[in-house]
Image (cartoon, rainbow, N blue to C red):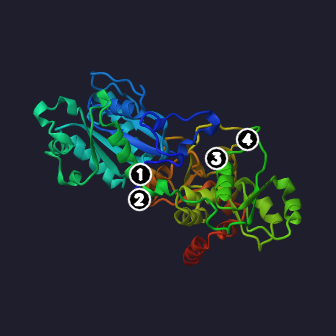
Amino acid sequence: MVKTESREGSRSEATSVRESGDALMRAPRGSRLGIGLFGRRNVGKSSVLNAITNQQASIVSDYAGTTTDPVDKPMELLPLGPVLFVDTAGIDDEGEVGRLRIERTEQVYSRCDMGVLVTEAGVWGAYEDRILAKLQDEGIPVILVFNKTDLLPLHAAGGADGLMELCREGIPAAARGLPAVCMAASERKGVAELRQALLDNAPDSFVNAPAILSDIVPAGSVVVLVIPIDKEAPRGRLILPQVQTIRDLLDGGCIPLCVRDTELPAALAALEEPPALVVTDSQAFGSVAAMVPDSIPLTGFSVAFARNKGDLLTQAMGTLAIAGLTEESRVLIAEACTHHPIEEDIGTVKIPRLLRKRVGEGLTIDNVRGADFPANLGDYDLVIHCGGCMFTRRQVLSRVRACVEAGVPVSNYGLTIAYCTGVFERSIRAFPWVAEQVMEGSARSA
């Protein structure tokens, strides 16, 4: 359970939910807890969102189907932290356009760490059963919101317990043990209760976010971060995985030493003791590996993010499939970011070049970006995903699981580059429990 008091002390209802401030202080989307609002049309999902955010985040109308596409609303839900509310179209939409809206809603499940199932008080049917089954199949914590309680007969207002019991009448056994809130969202009633339910039921995986590297190196140790400055590094800034890794190491009491690849030899020579770890941008794996003695552990930012955001063991094992690719093979490269590809872009240029140099020019490579991800993965022999710094861990794991269920090996950018440049085994050695199983799997397949 998450306590409802922050370090600065208790917060009033008016300030417990607020928008992030200056853009530089805003949490990246991948670090936000995804909370999806699901339900039929006109049950008040948008009103619930407006009530919890205390602003007009979504358009509200008596006309069924007002919300046509998922509406994202990043907020700061104190003391839990940064969250992303997603208001969806009604699951009972009709017609061809309605079918497309439902498909958009279905895509939201993989983005959610929590689900809020909104239904009108006293109404439960096949649509609610369908939403609940989908959320539970995905392993997503569910909170029920019985909205429009102000429309219930006056005699039903026999206290909070009586109202809740009335709302629970007729719901299936699978929903009876779930946390639930009674609301009249249009009147802002039940907001505090919903906020508390969200705090109390936040997944441990979000409240206790996995470390990036600070748990594999001792506090007080020096970790050298090799950060090449190229066209993909925004002027005056570092890219997100590098910033997050620096913060993770600082939180762990480590001493991050940031250098360009051109200054790496001088940095290593200046240290009285060898660093506990060297972490490099994956695109510099080959040259950095040549500079760093084999006795010093070496890995990449993207490899570290395969553990932090995804499943390092599954993705490392999947990387071994590169050895079996032929010119008749088909590879999917998936990028979470939607930035405009630059010259020498890693996903559309550099990795395809490495793979075709190894396999042959006939290798078929498809690229997707952002929320696009094929439903039929069986057409591919390998999926290569980016580090996922802009995705939540649930989103990355959802894609990894989809690959596993389709029987398709899945790797990531850093692991693929390490393999193609001959430093794969070394790049995972910093994670011995993974390296041991991968090497055993490699020996068996050989």
Helix, strand or loop status at disc 3: helix
- Of badges 2 and 1, nearer the viewer stands 1
Residue wearing tag 4: 237
**Residue that extends furthest to the front in the rendered view of this protein:** 9
Residue at figure coordinates x 35%, y 32% from the top left = 101
Helix, strand or loop status at disc 1: loop
Callout 1 amino acid: Ala
Where residue 136 appears, x then y in whole percent? 31, 53
- Left or right: 423 as drawn, with respect to 182: right
* Mark 4 vs 3, N-terminal side: 4
Residue wearing tag 3: 347
Where residue 319 appears, x then y in whole percent? 59, 63
Residue wearing tag 1: 202
Kindly indicate the quadrant of the structure image that contains residue 168.
top left
Where residue 61 appears, x then y in whole percent? 31, 21
Q: Is residue 60 above or below residue 237?
A: above
* Mark 1 vs 3, N-terminal side: 1
* Mark 4 vs 1, N-terminal side: 1
